[in-house]
Image (spheres, rainbow, N blue to C red):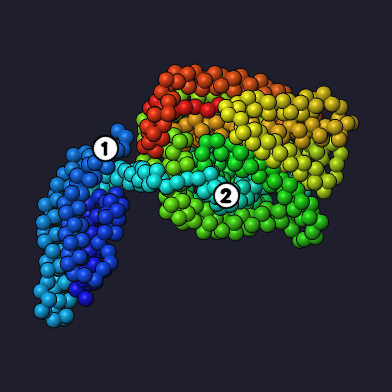
């Protein structure tokens, strides 16, 4: 009874509480590494030896923390600052008292009664807990972020070193990849399809009479398309910070639920002003999905695996067009007291809320805390992505990395591409239905004729990203090739006469191939940016370009130019020219950076390369980092 009481009550509880006093989460993690040696058994001598060993390890804990801290990059050496050292020194003065109490518990005489023994043990535990509570007050609140960063980095390093002892055969690797795909891809793809449907429901609503019912005039409908991206833009940087500070999976799920509720509110608007308000809110709430998904891809997949999955993910927006077209066609036949466009908003909003609740339970966060993975699988996931050199997760925002991203030419070339590749998207997404209806097709036919553009998006994205995955350093060349069908479609819209409705319709569908280039640009950014803060900053800037492009795009499609929209077509020509120039410049820049590091790209430096990546170094600081293009 004495042995089981000490082990099951005193030792784990005291050690864990002491860990909290020593270094919060980091101390808890360190102690979990040694606690397993003090569990189980019925032999008192064995238990005494085990606890004695644990006591010795406790006395060495400060040295252990110092040793671990030397394994992290310079940014994490704040752990050894004077404040923490002072706290450790104060806590260290309580070692003797706490360990003496534990030793007393082990050596309680055998001839005392059970009641007296329990009384003494409870007194020892109370005295120990009092000491531990005092110790806990010495942890500076300002050190919490640094300790969390240390904890995550040390945990990732441990998982990687564990993975070195685990054989990762091609069969096991394939099995793990399938497990990741089956869990992540359906969740992320359906979420993105819903996002595409929800933000573009305004286009179907316009076909069903929203403009007439709300008495929209002039460019007011253009504002309803563009203002969505203004909300997205304003909330993009705060969203990126929230994604770093909070669990990615819970934050993304919560925003899905919230935007579903806002979409339902679209069905209750009765004026241009109220429509603008809900469009801004919808844009702000949808801002988390793109950067959150890119972070998840970088945590779970190798760089060579990312393009294809990015293509499937972005291509799922095309699947959203197909689903929305079928659903809108069906809803258009429903007889209801409410106008069809209001019913559209309410139904899709309710579906989105329900899906957000499902995501709360199923969407995983960082690999180290993914419940659907076994400990060995977590180690393998981290081991697989360590070669990316882009890190796992770090919740400490680093200003040095922020400014590095802002001063990196690569960032601004990607931003320019994002701006010019999404300006056509903003116009075509908002006005596709009106372009088709203006060609002489009926309302219900218009909902169906928007479906092929979704199929073009899906096929173009998957093919382009499959090629980028199969052929090394082919991402930018494939992006340039992807602009060819887009250019052909725009030329057709410009030169074909209005009377040739079906040929113009085919050119409109063809022009939606531009989505493949935007997809690969996100893959290029994700694979070539290291350092967690730098990565989220770069992602945020790309999405700002995405928002600005989508915001200004609809204003080039003037109502008085329907159905030819000459200004909108001219804007798309200009964007194609700028995209070609920015892609060529980016290609040359990345090639030159790799050339300057060629002498460091050797087999013996591979270990240093992945450790530097896990330790949250940026692609500038990590001289072993190799760019892909």
Image quadrant in which the N terminus is located: bottom left
Q: Position of residue 520 (x, y in %)?
A: 60, 33
Q: Position of residue 110 (x, y in %)?
A: 12, 76
Is residue 47 rendered to the left or right of residue 443? left
Closer to us: 28 or 84: 28
Q: Position of residue 629 (x, y in %)?
A: 55, 26
Label 2, label 1: how far apart the Cα atoms are? 37 Å
Label placed on residue 111? none
Q: Are marks 2 and 1 in contact (CB under 8 Å)?
A: no
Closer to us: 298 or 269: 298
Question: Which residue sits at x=56%, y=21%?
Answer: 587
User: Is any atom of residue 222 visible in this view?
Assistant: no
**Residue tagged 2:** 178
Q: Image quadrant of residue 337?
A: bottom right
Is residue 467 rendered to the left or right of residue 531? right
**Residue tagged 1:** 70
Closer to us: 397 or 80: 80
User: Is any atom of residue 143 visible in this view?
Assistant: yes
Within-10-Å neighbours for mark 2: few <14, some 14–19, many 20+: few
Outermost residue to the right: 499
Question: Which residue sits at x=74%, y=28%?
Answer: 485
Q: Is 261 drawn above or below residue 146 in the view shown? A: below
Is label 2 or label 1 in front? Answer: 2
Q: Is 281 drawn above or below residue 77 in the view shown? A: below
């Amino acid at each position: 009874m004495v042995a089981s009481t000490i082990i099951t009550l005193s030792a784990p509880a005291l050690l864990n509480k002491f860990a909290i006093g020593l270094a919060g989460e980091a101390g808890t993690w360190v102690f979990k590494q040694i606690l397993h040696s003090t569990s189980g058994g019925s032999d008192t001598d064995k238990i005494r030896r085990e606890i004695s060993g644990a006591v010795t390890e406790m006395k060495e804990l400060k040295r252990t923390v110092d040793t671990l801290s030397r394994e992290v990059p310079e940014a994490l050496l704040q752990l050894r600052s004077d404040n923490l050292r002072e706290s450790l020194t104060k806590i260290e003065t309580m070692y003797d008292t706490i360990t003496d109490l534990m030793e007393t518990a082990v050596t309680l005489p055998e001839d005392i009664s059970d009641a007296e023994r329990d009384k003494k043990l409870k007194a020892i535990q109370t005295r120990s807990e009092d000491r531990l509570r005092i110790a806990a007050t010495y942890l500076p609140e300002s050190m919490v972020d640094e300790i969390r960063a240390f904890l995550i980095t040390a945990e990732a390093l441990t998982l990687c070193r564990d993975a070195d002892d685990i054989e990762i055969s091609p069969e096991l690797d394939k099995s793990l990849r399938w497990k990741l795909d089956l869990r992540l891809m359906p969740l992320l793809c359906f979420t993105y399809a819903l996002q595409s449907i929800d933000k573009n429901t305004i286009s179907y609503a316009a076909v069903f009479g929203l403009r007439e019912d709300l008495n929209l005039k002039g460019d007011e409908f253009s504002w309803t398309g563009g203002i969505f991206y203004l909300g997205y833009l304003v909330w993009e940087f705060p969203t990126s910070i929230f994604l770093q500070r909070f669990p990615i999976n819970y934050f993304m799920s919560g925003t899905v639920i919230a935007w579903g509720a806002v979409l339902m509110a679209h069905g209750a608007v009765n004026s241009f002003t109220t429509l603008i308000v809900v469009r801004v809110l919808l844009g702000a709430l949808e801002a988390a999905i793109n950067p959150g998904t890119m972070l998840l891809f970088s945590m779970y997949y190798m760089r060579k695996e990312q393009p294809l999955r990015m293509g499937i993910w972005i291509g799922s927006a095309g699947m959203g067009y197909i689903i929305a077209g079928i659903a809108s066609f069906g809803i258009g036949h429903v007889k209801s007291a409410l106008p069809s466009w209001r019913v559209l908003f309410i139904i899709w909003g309710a579906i989105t809320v329900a899906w957000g609740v499902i995501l709360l339970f199923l969407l995983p966060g960082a690999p180290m805390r993914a419940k659907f993975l076994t400990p060995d699988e977590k180690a393998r996931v981290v081991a697989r992505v360590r070669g990316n050199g882009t890190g796992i997760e770090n919740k400490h925002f680093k200003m040095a990395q922020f400014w590095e991203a802002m001063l990196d030419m690569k960032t601004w070339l990607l931003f320019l591409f994002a701006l010019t590749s999404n300006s056509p998207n903003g116009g075509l997404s908002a006005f596709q239905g009106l372009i088709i209806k203006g060609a002489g097709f009926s309302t219900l036919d218009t909902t169906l004729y928007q479906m092929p553009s979704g199929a073009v998006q899906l096929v173009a994205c998957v093919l382009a990203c499959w090629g980028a995955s199969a052929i090394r350093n082919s991402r930018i060349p494939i992006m340039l090739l992807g602009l060819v069908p887009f250019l052909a479609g725009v030329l057709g819209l410009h030169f074909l006469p209005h009377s040739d409705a079906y040929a113009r319709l085919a050119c409109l569908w063809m022009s939606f191939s531009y989505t493949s280039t935007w997809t690969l640009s996100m893959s290029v950014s994700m694979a070539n940016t290291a350092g967690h803060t730098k990565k989220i900053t770069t992602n945020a800037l790309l999405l700002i370009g995405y928002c600005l492009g989508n915001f200004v795009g609809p204003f080039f499609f003037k109502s008085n130019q329907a159905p030819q929209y000459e200004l909108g077509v001219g804007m798309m020509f200009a964007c194609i020219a700028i995209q070609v120039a920015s892609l060529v410049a980016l290609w040359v820049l990345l090639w030159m950076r790799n050339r300057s590091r060629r002498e460091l790209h050797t087999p013996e430096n591979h270990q240093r390369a992945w450790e530097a990546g896990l330790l949250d170094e940026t692609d500038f600081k990590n001289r072993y980092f190799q760019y892909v293009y």
